[in-house]
Amino acid sequence: MAGNCVEVAFNKPKVELHVHLDGTIRPETILDVAKKRGIALPTDSAEDLARLCMLCKPATLTEFLCKFHHFMHVIAGDLTPDEVVDLVNRGLRAGENTFRIKARSILCCMRHMPNWSMEVVELCKKYRHSGVVAIDLAGDESLNCEAHPGHRKAFEEAVRSGVHRTVHAGEVGPPSVVKEAVEVLKAERIGHGYRTLEDRTLYEQLLKKNMHFEVCPMSSKLTGACDPDFTKHPLIRFKEDKANYSLNTDDPLIFNTTLDVDYSITQKYMNFTEKEFKRLNINAAKSSFLPEKEKKDLLNRLFDAYGMKKPALKGGTENSRDIQLIMSTHSE
Ligand code: ZN
């Protein structure tokens, strides 16, 4: 990937909250699986396959979705949803042990498939002790939940049974989708959320609530969600307002990106500093859906790695202004 030769903007442990497994597969893995299953691909070179799968310039949703057609038939097998969730969790656990990282899964409903959503939340409940931490909703934001009550019912069940919730909203869709995510689906985090800025009242409400925004810089340029000029990115406003947000890759295979690429974009075009990188990662850790004890351990690991004194944490999340204070007492 082009990301391999990027200048590293923040060479410290990072928290990523928003990355889709089907947009994260290595081209080499796709080739291996295709060979094993006897499926012909247009090329047997990993580089050529990567080029086929990646978006190079801002595209439409259809063009973006087309990219998945190059490899999804290779990856999708005849497994049941249960088997998929179980195998993914087992893989993530193996990765956690091998690389000393934390990796948990979020099961994602699709806006155009409201009939699947109840099954998704049931899977979240069934596998909550073996790696699944939350439910999500993604897809075409013009399909609202009023017209598709399946999602609302599933998210209500998630609230009832204590399954965490995040929703893709305000990426391409208007602020009303964000409002619906928060008020109807009871989202605790918003995937993207850039267009929240167009509704000042809503934005201020969410700032006050310390709502977490999962921001994906390279993705937002290539999906056409944001102005391709990074110096005009909504993220700058989030940073200035000390909002609670994280930096994420979304679909690293499709967007030909890595966390280092996304971080370097913010450093190069949005004047991000080491201090802001630390602040946003601590907020990301606090907004993660880990059980409280594990969250605390993760935060302690970050404070150690960042050379910051551990604050006395009063339970769950503290607001970003508290973090500000910590940062200014322990700046590098
Ligand atoms: Zn996403």
Image (cartoon, rainbow, N blue to C red):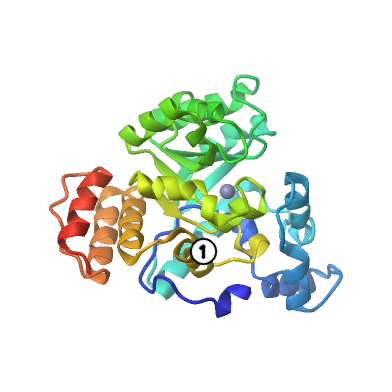
Residue placed furthest toward the left: 312
Residue 190 against residue 307 in the figure, above or below:
above
Residue 131 against residue 331 in the figure, above or below:
above
Q: Tell me residue 158's x, y (percent).
A: 45, 32
Q: Residue at x 66, y 28 (%)?
A: 143
Pick the front one: 106 or 328: 328
Pick the front one: 296 or 13: 13
| Residue denoted by label 1 | 265
Label tally = 1
Q: Residue at x 77, y 71 (%)?
A: 49
Q: Tell me residue 326's x, y (percent).
A: 18, 56
Crowding near the residue tagged with mark 1, few <14, some 14–19, many ≥20 C-alpha atoms within 10 Å: many
Pick the front one: 114 or 167: 167
In the rendered view, does 331 fall on the left or right side of 236? left
In the rendered view, does 189 fall on the left or right side of 59? left
Q: Tell me residue 249's x, y (percent).
A: 54, 59
Assign the N terminus to one quadrant of the image.
bottom right
Residue 159 visible here? yes
Pick the front one: 331 or 72: 331
Specify the amino acid type for callout 1: Ile
Residue 19 against residue 204 in the figure, above or below:
below
Q: Residue at x 36, y 61 (%)?
A: 277
Residue 289 visible here? no
